[in-house]
Each structure stands twice: as C-alpha cells, then as structure tokens.
Image (cartoon, rainbow, N blue to C red):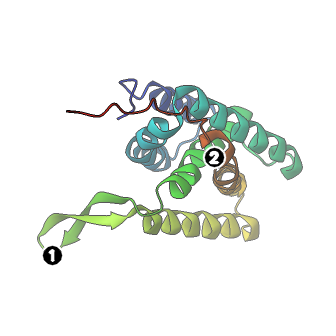
Amino acid sequence: MPREGLPLATLALGLLVAIAHLAAGAHELAWLALDLLALAVLGPSVESSLGRARLLALCLLAGALCLGARGLLGEGSPAPLLFAATGALAAVLGAHLLLYPRARVASLAPIPFHFTIVEIPSALLLALWLLAQLALAAAGLESDLGASPAPHLAHLGGFAAGALLVWPLAHRVRRPLPPRLPVY
C-alpha cells in the first residue's frame, strides 16, 4: 500500500484501461480481466516506490511512446486510447520487475481436486507474460485471419519503456538526516 494511503494512481490507470477496452469495442474480456488483475497485484507496490506523481509521469511517458510507435504500425492498429492505456499498464509491470526483482506473488495453484496458495517469483510471472505477448504478436503478424499484433506489441513496447524510464523517476534526492543525539 502506498505511503499516501489508497493507491489512487493505480486505480485511475485501471479505470483508464477498462474504459479504453470498452471504448475500442475490445470484446476480449479475459484480456481486460488479466490486465486489471496484474495492475491490482503489482501496481500498488510500484506506486509506493515512485509516488503518485512519478507513477503518473511514467504512465504518461510510456503511453506517449506507445502512441508514437502506433503510427509506425499503420492502419491495422487499434484505437489510440487503448494502445496508450495498454502501453502504460505494461510500463507499470516493467517498472515492477526492475524495482522488485526478487518479489514473490501469492497465487492459486491447481492441484487435483483442489487449489492451494503458493508464492511464485513475480519475475517468473512477468517472464511468462512477456513470452505470451511475444507469441501472440508473432501469431498476429503471421495470421491471415485479421488478428492484429498491435495490442501485444503495445504491451511489449510499454514494458520496455517502463523498464527504461523507472530508474530516472525512482531516483530520489535524499536529505541528510540530522545528527543523532546520544541517549544517556
């Protein structure tokens, strides 16, 4: 949980992603649910490290970079808001990987006839997510069915942008602490 209280920037980004999915007519509710779940699990810790203003700056910069890259993809790319929102969401995931490389995430693991909770390294989950995005982008590039690789490329670009932009934004100028007084 962020030091300031509720993770308002994370909630705002989640709302933006949901609105972008619905406005673009994205009918894949499973992708929307997975995006929001990843943001809900990993977003508050990034917001806690960066603060609200820096997290919003990270999302705006990554969204702008993804929107700029959208022009390179041509006409088959999705709505601009969806492209920027998914890029911003992926930037939060990229920032989380660099800020918390050894973090663990509590997850449900299916075992025959029941589920159990296990802790999985977030780096492993993010690596699987990246591989899925690469595979889906490659499948969309080779598909004649009209499947666009653009949303998956936006995820990959946003992830890279978040990983590159997090360090300049995470750097804080530390004020020197006052000298400690001895206790007698």
Residue 11: percent from left, percent from top: 45, 29
For disc 2, the marked residue is 166
Q: Which type of secondary structure does the marked residue at label 2 adopt?
A: helix
Residue in the picture at 38% in, 29% down: 3
Under mark 1, the amino acid is Pro
Side of 162 where 52 appears, left or right: left
Circle 2 Cα neighbour tier, 10 Å, few/some/many (<14 / 14–19 / ≥20): many
As measured in the structure, the alpha-carbon distance from the residue carrying label 1 to the one carrying label 2 is 41 Å
Residue 112, label in figure: 1
Quarter of the rendering occupied by the C terminus: top left
Q: Position of residue 140 (x, y in %)?
A: 69, 64
Q: Nearer the viewer, residue 89 or 75?
A: 89
Q: Which amino acid type is shown beneath numbered disc 2?
A: Val
Taking the spot 69% from the left edge, 46% from the top edge, the residue there is 165
Considering every residue shown, the one lying at the far front of the view is: 184
Instruction: Tell which residue pokes out farthest to the bottom in this image.
Output: 112
Q: Earlier in the sequence, mark 1 or mark 2?
A: 1
- Residue 110 on image: x %, y %: 22, 69
Q: Residue placed at 40% from the left, 46% from the top? A: 37
Q: Is residue 79 visible?
A: no
